[in-house]
């Protein structure tokens, strides 16, 4: 789908439909007034009838006889006082989904008057929302029941700084395509999305974006003493892959941001087998890794002045004759021994060696993302991801960068007592501390492998994929935290 900037005034836009905003608590924006006049006050009639309240992503459609846009879709933006550019992601996504389902291929999207205050951010949000709104999970359907017909979205400049709009458009398109790339990786079934396939996708993406990539095998991992990572792959017929992507955008700096993503392409739980119900969703257990791959592609396209390494330890977690058993002891790259209490606590085992490797490469800041614990879903549901950190300053900076993206996080504690729960009688650590505080004991385990490096851990178990569609997005993978990864990279950039 193409997203572009158009010069037309709203009332003259040539498209299958004109999309205009409406707030719930104040007079309409200038674009909405112009559209209302063009259709003889029909929009005013709908509002005054009480049929439309202007709630966020609420929609109403009016046909426009003998007008170049044929239809007007009004999309609610909620209270004007609460407006932020990030809401335009939902605004555009809702428009694309509502109109695309009706067979409309081309739309023109008007911006609210508030866009003049930050045209770059607003254009970026509309472009991102249009692209992510068009994503569908019907990859394997020969004839999707209700395909989206959308081919083109024109953002109406309407007197707003066009240079800023174009810059925002470029960023928004890259972010939207990165999010959809990560979603495609995550939704692909595990028989097709093996560790090898994930590595191949990462290689193609890095080649396209001009980023260096190394894909390491099990023998290399043994030479690096990555016993923790390799212990998870023991039961699988699929060979593990340790994916390392490098972007050096500032050769004058020794700062290095490491993005680390859990890449379990399918998780049965291993010998500690999961229940059969909903096990098919465990193809999403590589969402953190998919997010890192997509982010590195986007960084290569956006070219910020920052150095970033993306690390994805990729493997399946399967039962089998060679599978790691509860009670086994393995050793991580940094020499710490780990008693395996539950083989279904495998994500932290592969991340342990990935975090050690990030430090070995000289990372000065680390952010990891993982669908790590069911306890996170119990604590925060499907609204917020958990954030845990060993560094107050870095955590606050990450949250400040992430806030405008629309991805939501809730800061959780990391007191020493959570680490005490992870002490083993036979080894340095054990890989689970029981049910109590499961998200935090898992984070405490990871902390043992980052040393003193400022580090942020994101548990995205409740937000990486959703069971229902919204007005602006298909159900399935969300690929949180691609937007936030990009935001922190941009926030640390010198340009």
Image: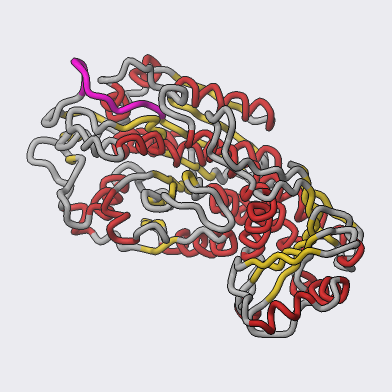
The residue most toward the front is 65
Q: In this view, does 154 lie above or below 179?
A: below
| Residue sitting at x 63%, y 41% | 147
The residue most toward the left is 425
Residue 40: x %, y % from top left? 85, 76
Residue 320 colored magenta? yes
Q: Which of 333 and 13 is in front in this view?
A: 13
Q: Nearer the viewer, residue 311 or 181?
A: 181
| Residue sitting at x 31%, y 55% | 376
Q: In this view, does 391 lie above or below 445?
A: below
Image quarter in which the N terminus is found = top right
Q: Which range of residues does the magenta coloring cover?
A: 314-323
Residue 488: x %, y % from top left? 56, 53
Residue 244, can we see it? yes
Left or right position of 82 against 469: right
| Residue sitting at x 41%, y 30% | 313
Left or right position of 382 against 70: left
Q: In this view, does 343 lie above or below 4?
A: above
Residue 234: x %, y % from top left? 27, 20
Q: In this view, does 297 lie above or below 223?
A: below
Q: Exactly how many numbered labels are in the figure?
A: 0
Residue 175 colored magenta? no
Residue 303, can we see it? no
Q: Which of 453 and 45 is in front in this view?
A: 45
| Residue sitting at x 18%, y 41% | 429
Give the colour scheme of this rendering.
secondary structure
Left or right position of 461 against 124: left
């Amino acid at each position: 789908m193409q997203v572009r900037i158009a010069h037309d005034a709203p009332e003259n836009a040539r498209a299958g439909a004109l999309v205009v905003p409406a707030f719930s608590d104040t007079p309409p924006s200038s674009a909405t007034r112009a559209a209302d006049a063009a259709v003889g006050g029909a929009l005013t009639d709908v509002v005054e009838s009480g049929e439309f309240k202007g709630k966020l992503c609420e929609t109403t459609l009016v046909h426009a006889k003998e007008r170049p846009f044929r239809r007007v879709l009004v999309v609610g933006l909620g209270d004007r006082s609460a407006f932020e550019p990030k809401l335009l992601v939902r605004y555009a996504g809702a428009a694309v989904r509502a109109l695309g389902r009706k067979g409309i291929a081309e739309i023109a999207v008007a911006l609210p008057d508030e866009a003049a205050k930050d045209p770059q951010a607003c254009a970026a949000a509309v472009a991102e929302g249009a692209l992510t709104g068009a994503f569908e999970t019907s990859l394997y359907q020969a004839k999707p029941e209700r395909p989206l017909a959308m081919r083109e979205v024109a953002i109406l400049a309407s007197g707003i700084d066009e240079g800023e709009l174009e810059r925002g458009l470029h960023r928004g398109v890259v972010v939207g395509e990165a999010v959809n790339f990560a979603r495609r990786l995550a939704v692909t079934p595990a028989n097709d999305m093996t560790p090898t396939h994930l590595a191949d996708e990462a290689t193609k993406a890095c080649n396209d974006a001009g980023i260096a990539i190394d894909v390491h095998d099990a023998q290399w991992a043994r030479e690096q003493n990555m016993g923790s990572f390799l212990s998870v792959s023991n039961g699988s017929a699929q060979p593990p892959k340790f994916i390392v992507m490098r972007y050096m955008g500032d050769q004058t700096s020794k700062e290095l941001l490491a993005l680390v993503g859990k890449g379990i392409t399918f998780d049965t739980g291993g010998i500690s087998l999961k229940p059969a119900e909903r096990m098919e969703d465990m193809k999403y257990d590589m969402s953190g890794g998919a997010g890192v791959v997509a982010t590195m592609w986007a960084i290569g396209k956006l070219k910020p002045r920052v150095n970033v390494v993306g690390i994805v330890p990729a493997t399946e977690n399967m039962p089998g004759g060679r599978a790691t058993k509860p009670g086994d002891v393995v050793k991580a790259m940094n020499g710490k021994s780990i008693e395996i209490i539950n083989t279904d606590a495998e994500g932290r085992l592969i991340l342990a060696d990935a975090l050690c490797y990030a430090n070995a490469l000289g990372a000065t800041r680390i952010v990891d993302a993982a669908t790590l614990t069911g306890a996170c879903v119990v604590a925060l549901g499907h609204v917020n991801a958990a954030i845990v950190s060993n560094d107050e300053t870095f955590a606050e900076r990450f949250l400040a960068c992430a806030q405008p993206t629309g991805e939501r996080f809730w800061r959780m504690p990391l007191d020493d007592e959570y680490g005490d729960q992870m002490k083993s009688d036979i080894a340095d650590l054990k890989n689970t501390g029981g049910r109590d505080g499961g998200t935090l004991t898992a984070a405490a385990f990871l902390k043992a492998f980052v040393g003193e490096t400022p580090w942020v851990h994101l548990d995205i178990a409740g937000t990486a994929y959703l069971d229902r569609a919204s007005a602006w997005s298909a159900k399935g993978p969300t690929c949180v935290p691609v937007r936030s990864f990009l935001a922190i990279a941009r926030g640390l950039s010198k340009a």
